[in-house]
Image (tube, helix red, strand yellow):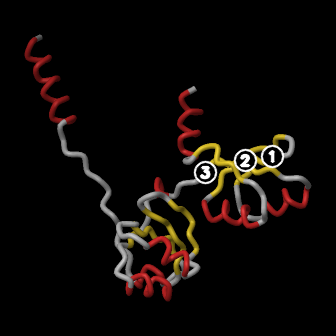
Amino acid sequence: MTIKIVLSLLAVCLLGCQPQTQESPTPLTAESFQAGPQLVKINLDRPGVFQNLAAQNVEIIVQEEDYIIVRLDLTAFGEIQAMSLSTEKPKESELVQRLIAVVTSDSEQITAVNNTGINIWEMRGDSVIAQAFDNQINAIKTMGLPVEILEDNIQNVVKKISQK
């Protein structure tokens, strides 16, 4: 009996003590863009990177504190490479969407908000509750509509719901 317990503990330790393999970043090359524009993660590891890219009208899909995800074609990718920026293929978990509320006053505004491509969850009176990427949120703000971020990462909401 004692030998079984020791062997079980040893097996648990060996399995639990294995080094965790982390997914290494997938580098991007010009060949990655042969099929068309791609999403690219750019680390914000130097001051001014975000401002420089925003000034070049790069389509910023996700904006986090330490990285952004942009949509680039081959030409724009070449320009990013010339800037010696760290680029890689984003992981699915890095494609962060926000849970938002947008106050609208009429059906035309609701249609315009919907046309940004957000995923509407529900309508509450004069508010639209939806999930959206940062570029969609910026498009809605450009319309002059107020946007309230209810949750910074939609995955947090999904986890809360699944725990119930």
Q: Decide: is 101 above or below 26.
A: above
Residue 84 image-quadrant placement:
bottom left
The quadrant the N terminus occupies is top left
Say what amino acid the circle numbered 2 marks: Ala
Say what amino acid the circle numbered 3 marks: Arg
For label 3, the SS is strand
Residue 75: x and y, percent? 49, 88
The reply, left or right, for residue 151 in relation to residue 66 is right
- Between 53 and 119, which is closer to the camera in this rendering? 53
Sooner in the amino-acid sequence: mark 1 or mark 2:
2
Q: Residues within 10 Å of mark 2 (few under 14, many from 20)?
A: many
Disc 1, disc 2: CB below 8 Å?
A: yes
| Cα gap from disc 1 to disc 2, whole angstroms | 6 Å
Residue 139: x and y, percent? 70, 66
The reply, left or right, for residue 75 in relation to residue 15 is right
Disc 1, disc 3: CB below 8 Å?
A: no
Residue 138: x and y, percent? 66, 64
For label 2, the SS is strand
Q: Decide: is 80 above or below 95.
A: below
Q: Residues within 10 Å of mark 3 (few under 14, many from 20)?
A: many
Residue 102: x and y, percent? 76, 51
Query: Which residue shows up at 75% across the image and 54% down it?
Result: 146
- Residue located beneath label 3 in the image: 98
| Cα gap from disc 1 to disc 3, whole angstroms | 16 Å
Residue 101: image tag: 2
For label 1, the SS is strand
Sooner in the amino-acid sequence: mark 1 or mark 3:
3
- Residue located beneath label 1 in the image: 127
Query: Which residue shows up at 50% across the image and 84% down it?
Result: 76
Taking the view exactly as shown, the residue that stands out farthest to the front is: 47
Query: Which residue shows up at 48% across the image and 71% down it?
Result: 50
